[in-house]
Image (cartoon, helix red, strand yellow):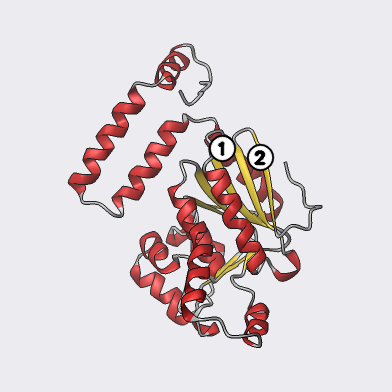
Amino acid sequence: MRDHQSDRPVLLARADGVARLTLNRADRLNAMSDPMLDLLVDLVADVAADPDIRVIVLTGAGRGFCVGGDLDAFSAAADDEPVSRGAAIEKLHRHMRVSELLRASHAVSIAAVNGACAGAGLSLAAACDLRISSSAAVFRSAFVDAALSGDFGGTWLLTRLIGESRAKQLAFLNQKIDPATALEWGLVSAVHAPEDFERGVDAVASALARKAPRALAGLKHNFSDAANLTFAEASAIEARRHVDCSRTNDLVEAANAFLERRAPRFTGT
């Protein structure tokens, strides 16, 4: 499923309902460049719209997940012809669609954090539905020490994941936290030794890909609604989604598989 021979800044592999996106600038700890982000937006949009994809795994090549923006590229750009404020905002917001696409997709997304995860890399991990960490990983906001205020939705996402106090602690103090602390805070759901990391991520991705896709998508959207709607509004939509799932062939298959003591074979219909 993995092909690290390509020199493209993002690699995509699809198999058995799982799309694996690998940030591929290992020599820069997968720091974000414009070509990487342009390609990443396109690839995430592609897999997010693919009805055959049930799980999206986002990870990094080499020793890092993603350390955020490439500061060397920022420095070089400062010597070029100035870009207007409006054009700079438009470009950044276009790139930040990655976080929006991950959250809006029907597919469950997993950030497989194999190493350093900082700045916009931490924001991208937070945009995923689940985060699984290697014990070799490290998490850091990093924005304030780079004289930046944050992007890719990190402040909004981290506040909801770990609470306002801890999110501010990470951001203002640029605190570095290890995987054990990330697990304690609820930032990640599991930590694996490096030698077991890939196997652990693949096991979760494969298990999710075998579940009823409409049920997974419905649950995911219910949680998104919970962050934005009133209880009454969310409950009304939750009821509609639940009834829609109850009228699928997958519900019948789940019942038959239970009675026949076998694993279900969901088709998404």
Q: Which of the numbered marks, if any, corresponds to residue 222?
A: none
149 sits left or right of 47 in the view: left
Quadrant of the drawing holding the C terminus: top left
User: Which residue corresponds to mark 2?
Assistant: 14
| Residue 170 in sight from this viewpoint | yes
Q: Is residue 169 above or below residue 18?
A: below
Quickly name the residue at label 1. Answer: 53
The structure residue drawn at horizontal position 55% and vertical position 41%, both measured from the top left corner, is: 55
Residue at image coords 51%, 63%: 94
Foreground residue, 117 or 233? 233
Horizontally, residue 218 falls left or right of residue 56, namely left
- Left or right, 138 with respect to 62, comes to left
Q: Secondary structure at mark 2?
A: strand
In the rendering, at what x and y percent does residue 10 appear?
A: 68, 56
Q: Secondary structure at mark 1?
A: loop
What x and y, as percent, mark residue 98?
52, 57
**Could you tell me the amino acid type at mark 2?**
Arg
Question: For the residues marked 1 and 2, what is the alpha-carbon distance in whole angstroms?
Answer: 8 Å
